[in-house]
Image (tube, rainbow, N blue to C red):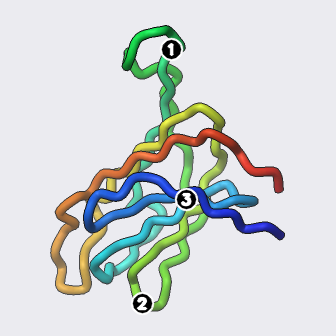
C-alpha cells in the first residue's frame, strides 16, 4: 500500500499533513503531547465558491467525525482517522483540549489542510 505524504501548513509548533491511501491527517508537534480521545480534536471542513477573485465565504460546512486516534509513543505526532476527506475542502483542526506532558496548551492550536487530491485506497 502506497503511503504518500502530502506536506501542508507549518505553524511553528504544529504541522499538519495528509496521508495517502488513508482518510485522515497526521498532526506533527514540536512538544510531546498527552493524547486524548476523539473528543479532544475539533474538526471543521468547508469550501469556498469558485470565482476569479481571492477568498470568499465558507460554504458547505461539515464536521467530520474522528473515527480513530493513534498517538505516537514519543507523543510528537498523532494520526487521526476521519470519516471522510473531500477533495477541494479545507479541514480546520482546533486542538484546544490537547495538552503537553507538563499540562500546557499548544501555543498554536489551529491548523488548516486543503485536500487537493483524495488518494485511492
At horizontal 35% and vertical 72% (from top left) the residue drawn is 29
Disc 1 versus disc 2: distance between alpha carbons? Answer: 41 Å
Q: Which mark is residue 74?
A: 2
- Quarter holding residue 96: bottom left
- State which tag comes first along the sequence, 1 or 2: 1
Where residue 24 sits, quadrant-wise, is bottom right
Query: Nearest the camera: 55 or 39?
Result: 55
- Asked whether 3 or 93 is in front, the reply is 3
Secondary structure beneath dot 2 equals: loop
Tell me the residue at 41%/44% (across/down): 92
Query: Please, is residue 70 above or below residue 81 in the view?
Result: below
Residue 25 badge = 3
Cβ–Cβ under 8 Å for marks 2 and 3: no
Which percent across, then down, holds residue 19? 63, 61
Q: Secondary structure at mark 1?
A: loop
Query: Mark 1: few, some, or many residues within 10 Å (few <14, many ≥20)?
Result: few
Q: Residue furthest front?
A: 52
The residues tagged by marks 2 and 3 sit, at their Cα atoms, a distance apart of 18 Å
Residue at 72% from the left image edge and 68% from the top image edge: 3
Check residue 49 in the rendering and tell me which mark sits there, or answer none: 1
User: In the image, is 10 to the left or to the right of 116?
Assistant: left
Amino acid at each position: 500500500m502506497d503511503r504518500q505524504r502530502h506536506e501542508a501548513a507549518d505553524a511553528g509548533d504544529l504541522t499538519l499533513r495528509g496521508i495517502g491511501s488513508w482518510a485522515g491527517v497526521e498532526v506533527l508537534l514540536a512538544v510531546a503531547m498527552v493524547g486524548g480521545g476523539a473528543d479532544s480534536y475539533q474538526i471543521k471542513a468547508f469550501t469556498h465558491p469558485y470565482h476569479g477573485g481571492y477568498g470568499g465565504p465558507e460554504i458547505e460546512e461539515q464536521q467530520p467525525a474522528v473515527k480513530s486516534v493513534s498517538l505516537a509513543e514519543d507523543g510528537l505526532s498523532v494520526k487521526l482517522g476521519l470519516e471522510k476527506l473531500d477533495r477541494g475542502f479545507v479541514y480546520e483542526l482546533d486542538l484546544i483540549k490537547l495538552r503537553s506532558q507538563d499540562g500546557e496548551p499548544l501555543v498554536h492550536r489551529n491548523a488548516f489542510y486543503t485536500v487537493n487530491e483524495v488518494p485511492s485506497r
